[in-house]
Image: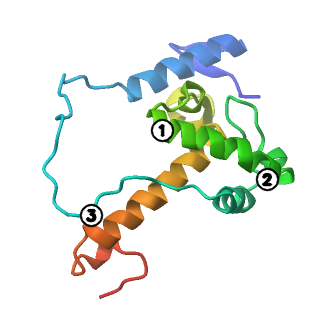
Amino acid sequence: MYPPLIESDIFVTNVQDKAVILNDLFVKQCSLIDNERQIPDSLPSRTQSKLRRIEIPLEKIVQLINQLDSKKANGCDEISIRMLKLCAHECSIPLKMLYDMSLETGHYPALWKMANVVPIHKKGDCQVKTNYRPISLLPICGKIFKKIIFEEVYKHLVENLIPIHLSGFRPGDYY
């Protein structure tokens, strides 16, 4: 699938060895900085309006599933977009139950945090490891959930916190 890599002037053809080389490269690019800072228990409120509950209609889940690109790769859960689209209405009920439970408990499923990392060639010599970049393929059900949450939080911010003169943060507003 991937051409041989040159590592320390050695021609590496073994698939597992190439995976280790690329993994080591990507890990070095993405290190977490632990500064031991903590999020404060409470933050001052800047508005009277609070986002207390997010309602997720079944129709919204179906709509988002139907908007997905069937040609995109699936994540580590092996649930394909094509399969989801074939049974969007049937899948929306258990997905809504999972999403509602996640919001209620504050627990995001661990599997949705995992990704298949795939090396993608950028440009230049295919045998040089630094000419690859990582792409993370995430589980689609988690991506749908994140999109729903983002849209609701963003809508709340635009309606309640972002002043009208900050039009650069408002979609379609070109003051």
Q: CA distance from mark 2 to mark 1?
A: 23 Å
Front residue of this view, candidates 92 and 86: 92
How crowded pointer 1 is (Cα within 10 Å; few <14, some 14-19, many 20+) is rated as few
Task: List x then y, in percent, for residue 110.
Answer: 54, 25
Task: List x then y, in percent, for residue 134.
Answer: 54, 35
Pick out the residue farthest to the bottom.
175
Residue that numbered label 1 is attached to: 104
Measuring 29% from the left and 58% from the top, which residue is drawn there? 50
Quadrant where the N terminus sits is top right
The secondary element bearing badge 2 is classed as helix
Task: List x then y, in percent, for residue 39.
Answer: 21, 34
Disc 2 vs disc 1: Cβ atoms closer than 8 Å?
no
Q: CA distance from mark 3 to mark 1?
A: 20 Å
Front residue of this view, candidates 52 and 146: 52
Splitting the image into 4 quarters, where does residue 126 fall? top right
Report whether 125 appears left or right of 175.
Answer: right
- The colour scheme used to paint the residues is rainbow
Amino acid type of disc 3? Ser
Q: Earlier in the sequence, mark 3 or mark 2?
A: 3
The secondary element bearing badge 1 is classed as helix
